[in-house]
Image: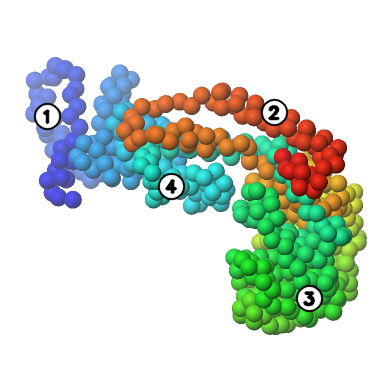
Amino acid sequence: MSSSSMQNIDDILSVNITTTAKTPTRDYEVKSHEYLTTFLHWNSTEQSLFVEDLLKNMDSSQHGYINSFLSRMLRRDFIGQLSSCGLEHLAEKILEYLDEQSLQSVELVCREWYYVTAQGMLWKKLIERKVLANTQWHDLSKHRGWHKYLFRQLLINGEQKKSNEFYRCLYHDIVRDIKQLTINWHTGKYQLEKIQCHSRHNKGVYCLQYDDQKIICGLRDNTIQIWNRKTLECVKTLTGHNGSVLCLQYDDKVIITGSSDSTIRVWDIETGILINTLVYHAEAVLHLRFVDKIMMTCSKDRSIAVWEINSPADIILHRALVGHRAAVNVVDFDDKYIVSASGDRTIKVWKAGTFDFVRTLIGHRRGIACLQYRDQLVVSGSSDNTIRIWNIECGTCLRILEGHEELVRCVRFDSKLIVSGAYDGKIKIWDLQAALDPRSQKSSLCMKTFTEHTGRVFRLQFDEFQIVSSSHDDTIICFNFLQPDMSTSYIRHHSSDSTNATSISNVDHTQVASSTATVQSTQETLQRQNSNLSRSSSADSETSKKLDII
């Protein structure tokens, strides 16, 4: 910055305060100059003490006058002053770290401050910071489609660049969307999508995994099906196993499956071609998990196998872990611990690096069917109909969740919720944070129970927006808690928004809420009608599948 610019800023920042005209005494100018000279020779501490003594000896009217004088002296419009010097970028840099409420207040200070926030696209930058720092915001940006308006915006077919006003309204739409999402989880309000898998012989969907594009599931009839997530159509069926497909996991290259035929098979996810078959376990492979180049499998033969993945075609057995006295139903791990659960009613913990045994978690009264390990928590489900939450570091049971009437077959959790599925056909949502609080009453822990499945629930997964579950009733059900898209409707409405917008407009929230309520009511009516049609329909399988999709 040049010295002339600095001089201009100093000139602007100087405060010209006029005082009320008063009649001084004759010797005031001489003595005041003498006192001021003495004052200036003192250090800052001495000056402050002297001023404090002066103030103590003044009356209230003098205090009021000095307060008014100081208020005008200390009040400086630094944003406006920087802007008038052509240094808007510095003003924007200062303001872009503000939160939502502060940014709203800044816009209301004056026209010049509003102009700085608009030119700096500060609402856009606030949304971008949220997306980078918060996984819920990031995932919502993908689901709703407004991620394309962030960072380096791509303009297609002559589309105009969005204004700060657009992003300000979008921000409030996002916040409202997230609040409604939280309410929907707690009240059990969702949209339902059902996939009828149409197994060829034995019915039942034992395992699944999903993303935004597809759902891959393993069936009791020995096949693996790949479904289009948007159209809910089966796009590919993989055959090769000689027994039920009990577990699977995929990444962007391969699908790895385990079966009751005791084998582990590796498939190319794009072509569906079988790449590799691994044979080690003597009985059914009940669960598998892989991360990077390490895979672990567990079996009815009571063992855990640790595999090293060099490539899809080159997977070698690294080590076997033994210690359980019954079938090992599930294994989970990270870079610190390996955790397994068995029909022998125990959970065992090993060190991940050395494979040294650490401890056994004892508490379930019957065999343990499912488990998830994350950070310091282990959540397990058992045929004693309970779910237990454990601290892996000390091995203590922190809470027992009761409510299922039969074996708890699957359980998943994140930082806020536990979702469980059982042989009673029910899916339950539990409040994890309340469960970790010993003061919470047992009656407050289960937030919601869903009974959409007509058979045993075998597997489920969930994220911020949905639960996807599979069952012995040969269906996959998707519970979508994200409401009809309000934010993208706003985007469509403002698709011609230009960068020249200067006024602050208001969205009619009453109209939006009314329209949303109408849409939800219509959807619920259609859901009831389609459910009745599904029960009474005797049409062919393709028609039945369409009726099941709500």
Callout 2 amino acid: Ser
Q: Is residue 118 left or right of residue 417?
A: left
Q: Is residue 431 left or right of residue 243?
A: left
Callout 1 amino acid: Lys
Q: Which residue is mark 2?
A: 521
Residue drawn at (15%, 34%), measured in percent from left and top?
Answer: 35
Closer to the eye: label 2 or 1:
2
Label 4 or label 1, whichever comes before in sequence order: 1
Residue 447 picture quarter: top right
Above or below, 353 against 420 in this view is below
Dots 2 and 1: beta carbons under 8 Å? Answer: no
Callout 3 amino acid: Thr
Q: Which residue is mark 1?
A: 31
Label 3 or label 1, whichever comes before in sequence order: 1
Give percent across and percent down for residue 22.
16, 17
Cα gap from disc 3 to disc 1, whole angstroms = 103 Å
Residue drawn at (69%, 74%), measured in percent from left and top?
Answer: 274
Q: Which residue is mark 3?
A: 263
Closer to the eye: label 4 or 2:
2
Give percent across and percent down for residue 95.
36, 41
